[in-house]
């Protein structure tokens, strides 16, 4: 790969939700704060939305990283295609409960949430790609989690993460929508944030200088519109092309070729 050519210790633009490469834009900071607020104040539910590639998943992974395992029991649900019963079984398994028969799933969840609370651990359930849930009964199953409370205090917080439009689906399940106490929408990065995003990821990968010239960065922003996933794809290919051409810095030519390659994958 190109990492040796550019004297990097890691590949800076892999499209994986790696908290090491988290870029804390103002928007991402606000999203994290809203999610933390919901958890710390024991609110019922929060919804995080954003267009494809804007960083929703990496925000959820940062959240998990910041939540101490000594204080929280966390279930990360990232298989939205499961049936409602299998969805609850998966949740139970992640919370440390052995499989139960269909009729006892919700009761087992309640018992586990109460047990964790009594042990000083609060339960957090994060549903990634929640917009892709096809079976409406899964949303009905999720709303049943809010029966787990005592003296008006919830035993768990549900965080729903997905693309724009998720909020309408959640609102369509009245008992679930009523519990949404925080909602935030992630927008693409602005131009200056895009430049900072690129340099931050390069530095975290061991770069000691800028590897993209100004024209390249301008072309990158115009092509990506500030969407992190697109930035990553373009930069990754541009660095590969630059290493092949043995240039000292990536220029507009490499960006244009990378954009063409991305658009024709």
Image: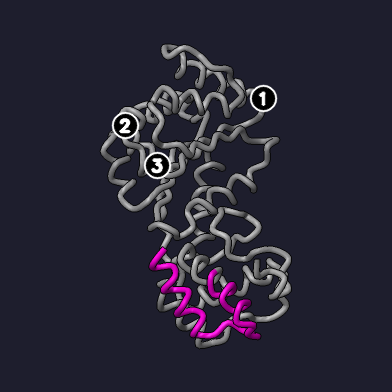
Image position of 4 (left or right of 242)? right
What residue is pinned by disc 1?
119
What residue is pinned by disc 3?
130
Q: 86 or 265: nearer the eye? A: 265
Q: Residue 81 magenta-drawn? A: no
What residue is pinned by disc 2?
135
Q: Residue at x 69, y 81 (%)?
A: 209
Q: Quadrant of residue 196?
A: bottom right
Q: Secondary structure at mark 3?
A: helix
Q: Earlier in the sequence, mark 2 or mark 1?
A: 1
Q: Residue at x 28, y 34 (%)?
A: 174
Q: Are the residues flagged by discs 3 and 1 in contact, CB closer than 8 Å? A: no
Q: Residue furthest front?
A: 244
Q: Is residue 28 above or below residue 220?
A: above
The C terminus, quarter of image: bottom left
Q: Position of residue 258 (x, y in %)?
A: 48, 74
Range covered by the magenta-colored residues:
237-265
Image position of 69 (left or right of 110)? right
Label 3: few (<14), some (14–19) or many (≥20) C-alpha neighbours in 10 Å: many
Q: Could you tell me what secondary structure mostly forms the magenta stretch?
A: helix
Q: Are the residues flagged by discs 2 and 1 in contact, CB closer than 8 Å? A: no
Q: Position of residue 217 (x, y in %)?
A: 51, 81
* C-alpha distance separating marks 3 and 1: 29 Å
Q: Secondary structure at mark 2?
A: loop
């Amino acid at each position: 790969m190109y990492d040796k050519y550019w004297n990097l210790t890691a590949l800076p633009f892999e499209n994986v939700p790696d908290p090491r490469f988290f870029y804390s834009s103002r928007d991402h900071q606000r999203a994290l704060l809203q999610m933390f607020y919901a958890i710390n104040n024991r609110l019922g539910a929060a919804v995080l939305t954003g267009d494809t590639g804007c960083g929703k998943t990496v925000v959820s992974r940062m959240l998990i990283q910041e939540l101490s395992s000594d204080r929280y029991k966390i279930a990360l649900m990232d298989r939205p295609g499961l049936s409602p019963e299998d969805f609850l079984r998966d949740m139970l398994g992640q919370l440390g409960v052995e499989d139960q028969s269909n009729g006892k799933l919700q009761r087992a969840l309640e018992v586990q949430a109460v047990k964790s609370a009594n042990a000083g651990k609060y339960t957090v359930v994060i549903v990634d790609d929640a917009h892709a849930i096809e079976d409406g009964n899964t949303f009905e199953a999720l709303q049943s989690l809010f029966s787990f409370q005592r003296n008006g205090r919830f035993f768990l917080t549900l965080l729903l993460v997905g693309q724009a439009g998720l909020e309408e689906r959640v609102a369509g399940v009245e008992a679930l929508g009523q519990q949404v106490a925080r909602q935030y929408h992630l927008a693409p990065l602005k131009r200056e944030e895009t430049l900072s995003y690129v340099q931050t990821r390069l530095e975290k990968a061991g770069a000691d200088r800028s590897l993209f010239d100004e024209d390249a960065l301008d072309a990158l922003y115009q092509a990506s519109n500030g969407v992190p996933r697109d930035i990553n794809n373009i930069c990754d290919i541009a660095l590969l092309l630059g290493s092949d051409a043995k240039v000292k810095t990536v220029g507009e030519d490499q960006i244009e070729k990378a954009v063409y390659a991305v658009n024709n994958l």
